[in-house]
Image (tube, rainbow, N blue to C red):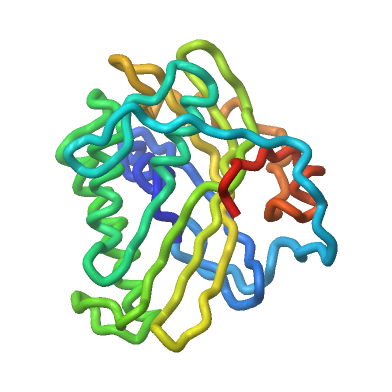
Amino acid sequence: MALGAVVILTGCAARSGSGEDGEAGVKGGGASPSVSGAVSPVPSYSKAQDWNEPERWSVLPGGQRTDDRGSQIGFPHTPEGAVAMMAAGNTTSVEADTSAVDEQLRIYRSYLAGADQSPRAAGQVESEAKAVDKRLATSMGSAVGQPLPAGAYMRSHVIGYRIVKKSPDEVSAWILAKVVQKNGETVAEQASYQRDLVAVQWVDGDWKLTVAASQRSRQDVQGHAKPTMGAPGDAVFNAAGWTAIRGAS
């Protein structure tokens, strides 16, 4: 149940027949929602017993300012700045007073290039997000359209990345996000890991998601194995070539 840049591009690429796809793996048992909202009943990896220090670390820069929607923007014109924007576009929180629709439209308006925005694309994004809200309400035992139970939330943030291709004005990368869901105050939190392919371009002085960059990134990874999912500290995290983000866990 991805709540970030990937869903945005799925909606906006609908007119061209191309979208992003993501995959989820479970940590700690339970079922994990995937990008399409389907449930993956089997964990994609097993957590190692011993801590393995990540071989690659990165401290990503912040945006220079916050826009009127509360999103960080104004990232440096560097590959690290591009990844920082990807991380910002895949950091979300759905809880009592914030819905998936709120978050998806915020990301759409803050991070998608203006040339790819349209009433039709916005409508598609909103429709996808409403479906996420409905699935969340059902899974949390709440009536559709009503506030989530007290203490319930779903949050995601990026914990690692692997660059696919970079140039001064375009960067693509696999990103690895941790998604946590808590269905109420007395319910244990469950965590899963989401892997997505994201691409951004330098547009009008900032990094932006674009459908064209997304399509090129998909062509670049065709025929190549996707990096195995694993949390920082797992042996597979290093073996897959992930770079850990300092401060993420």
Question: Which residue appears at 56% of the width and 67% of the height?
Answer: 191
Residue 217 quadrant: top right
Depth check: 87 or 54 in front? 54
What is the tally of numbered marks visible in this picture? Answer: 0
| Quarter of the figure with the C terminus | bottom right
Depth check: 239 or 124 in front? 239
Residue 154 position, x and y percent, is: 41, 66
| Quarter of the figure with the N terminus | bottom left
Residue 13 position, x and y percent, is: 36, 37
Depth check: 177 or 246 in front? 246
Question: Which residue appears at 65% of the width and 68% of the height?
Answer: 27
Depth check: 106 or 25 in front? 106
**Is 80 drawn above or below residue 122 in the view shown?**
above
**Is 127 drawn above or below residue 49 in the view shown?**
above
Q: Left or right: where does residue 37 sit relative to residue 143?
A: right
Which residue is outermost to the top? 168
Question: Which residue appears at 70% of the width and 54% of the height?
Answer: 230
Residue 106 position, x and y percent, is: 25, 46
Residue 207 position, x and y percent, is: 38, 24
Q: Left or right: where does residue 53 sit relative to residue 23?
A: right
Question: Which residue appears at 29% of the width and 84% of the height?
Answer: 142
**Is 235 drawn above or below residue 57 in the view shown?**
below
Residue 41 quadrant: bottom right
